[in-house]
């Protein structure tokens, strides 16, 4: 049976939230390799909120993929052909080729994985971009010291839960914010956070006040939207904020109306010396080895817990991705398993 | 003729913008001194925007004066009685006793002034809190390097014009923002800024685009209000912003409505790594001697120009203060001369 390479490509840039018709499934030949190259077959695909930004027409200001390009993102694959002495057939690799069956590389952008150290799927989650994002924002961007209260939004999500657990390991009091009673119970009972707030609850503001009697000293922001203006009132002087993402705004093409909270944020920065920092992982990958060295034992011995939800079938990639944005997603890392063997 | 001490005290906290009836003129005995103390008569009073914040009921989160207290702020005075060996009758001093004829001090909060070095009034302006505020925000909070474009809002004001001229002396391209054609002409022709923008002009946004073809690398914010959301679109990656003040918001007791620009500012911080810092002069007075050493020659030899507008009469203090907030003020440092001799 002749092999071919399926790709989920960008058909049109979304108008507002992404939808299935923004994608187009195309097939092409499997790439052929030259000296020094390897061809690998992708077995696992990472589903991440930032992929919405790659589609364009939203709040992001970073580069987008072109119409007709496959969706970008990390994958786990297995080497099928090699003319590179550093890679053997059967080697497991983590690549960045996105939503397609096959990838071609000279090896420089591949990370070899050892399945005896940790499950291969962790290379897309706690020992991949997900964990690295949390670790960098908690360690390198700001060094959150073991005192005071850390608030993490999107705390049941894969990045947020890693950040929250890192906060606990460093001796901070950690309060998680998530949507729904199930996630709040997960944060308190499974992750051992000190408190958790349900932003979907009718008494959200009262929960915030109860959970933050001493204010906020450190803040890991993953969400954006209407939750932030409520939380920002609780910043203590000299509070540090890591701006990791604002998933709730990614599909916005117009600004919201109503109360203009910008002057209030400026006032809080002015009088409380709030220190907000942001980062982008592509610029800081030089610290990835340091991250792996610290995080691997934490993940493999269970000091940092992580959740995964596997979905089977290459065809399901777009619909699985869309589940990130409708609020129904559990927060566990979504990974699509390829059915092509 | 028996002497008495006039004070302009806070009668009620303002509702919105301050007004004359928020003040009350009272008279009391001139303070009498103990060993180690001096009594001085105030001859010059500083009029500053932050004094609105001392009155309460506005956007500020810093301590206010109590009802019945005299308005706070810097003064220049002359020693009339001394039981402190470091001060002689006739010495010139800068104090912080605010809007009253006389002050009593043990000397620890007084700065001795030498009228042969610079005019005494400069101790309230370019060689006082005004210049210090600009210098600290341009030097210590952020160290604005000699490359790229600096934007200063409120650039015709006493703090802003000092900051803008410091920027020129450090080799930055400096664009000032001010209200009205006269101020724009002043910024270009008298202060020698590279460009100036009139935020009151109907083509304000076009002026911004024309003046900032290469974007903003450094920003000294004095104003707040609706001007900032227009300017923030022009921040370059890694731009640095000194948040000095937001005079246009000081009297706000409610947030504005309309477009909510908070998510847009968060997006700009997120994707352009905008670095916003704020400070408060009371916490950083240890650097005042360093400021004076650097600024005194710049001011006395004219490399930093400053404007002053003198108003005569203790009675005029409240009405002179109110001129800061109605947009009619020229931007020159307002100083009230006492008529008491």
Image (cartoon, coloured by chain):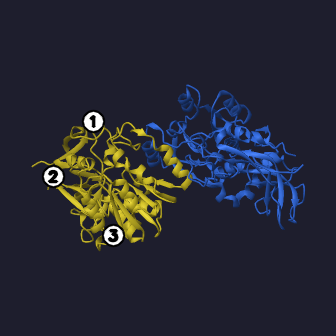
Chain colours: A yellow, B blue
Q: Pointer 3 and pointer 2: residues touching (CB < 8 Å)?
A: no
Q: Are marks 3 and 1 in contact (CB under 8 Å)?
A: no
Determine if marks 3 and 2 fall on one subunit.
yes
In the rendered structure, the answer to whether residue B105 lies left or right of residue A10 reads right
The quadrant in which residue B288 appears is bottom right
Residue depicted at 39% across the width and 65% down the height: A174
**How far separated are the C-alphas under marks 1 and 2?**
23 Å
The front one of A67 and B128 is: B128
Task: Name the residue nearer the viewer: A58 or B337.
Answer: B337
Closer to the camera in the image, A247 or A68: A247
In the displayed structure, would residue A1 be above or below residue A11?
Answer: below
Q: CA distance from mark 3 to mark 1?
A: 39 Å
To which residue does mark 2 refer? A313
SS class, disc 1? loop
Residue of label 3 = A296
How many numbered circles are shown?
3
């Amino acid at each position: 049976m002749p092999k071919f390479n399926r790709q989920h490509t960008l058909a049109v840039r979304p108008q507002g939230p992404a939808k299935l018709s923004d994608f187009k499934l195309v097939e092409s030949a499997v790439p052929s390799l030259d000296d020094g190259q390897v061809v690998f077959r992708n077995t696992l695909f990472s589903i991440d909120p930032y992929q919405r930004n790659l589609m364009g027409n939203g709040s992001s200001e970073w580069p987008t993929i072109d119409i007709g390009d496959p969706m970008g993102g990390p994958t786990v694959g297995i080497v099928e052909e090699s003319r590179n002495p550093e890679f053997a057939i059967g080697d497991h690799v983590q690549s960045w080729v996105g939503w397609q069956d096959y990838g071609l590389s000279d090896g420089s952008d591949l990370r070899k994985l050892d399945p005896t150290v940790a499950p291969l799927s962790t290379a897309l989650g706690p020992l991949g971009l997900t964990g690295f994002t949390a670790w960098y924002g908690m360690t390198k961007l700001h060094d959150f010291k073991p005192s005071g209260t850390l608030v993490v939004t999107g705390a049941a999500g894969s990045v947020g839960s890693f950040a929250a657990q890192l906060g606990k390991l460093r001796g901070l009091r950690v309060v998680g914010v998530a949507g729904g009673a199930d996630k709040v119970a997960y944060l308190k009972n499974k992750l051992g956070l000190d408190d958790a707030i349900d932003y979907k609850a009718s008494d959200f503001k009262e929960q915030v006040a109860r959970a933050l009697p001493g204010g906020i000293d450190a803040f890991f922001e993953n969400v954006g939207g209407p939750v932030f203006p409520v939380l920002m009132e609780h910043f203590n002087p000299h509070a540090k904020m890591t701006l990791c993402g604002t998933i709730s705004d990614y599909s916005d093409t117009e600004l919201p109306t109503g109360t203009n909270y910008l002057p209030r944020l400026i006032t809080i920065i002015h009088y409380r010396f709030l220190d907000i920092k942001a980062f982008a992982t592509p610029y800081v990958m030089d610290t990835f080895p340091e991250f792996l060295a610290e995080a691997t034992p934490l993940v493999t011995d269970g000091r940092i817990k992580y959740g995964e939800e596997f979905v089977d079938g290459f065809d399901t990639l777009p619909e699985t991705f869309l589940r990130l944005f409708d609020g129904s997603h559990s927060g566990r890392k979504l990974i699509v398993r390829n059915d092509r063997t």
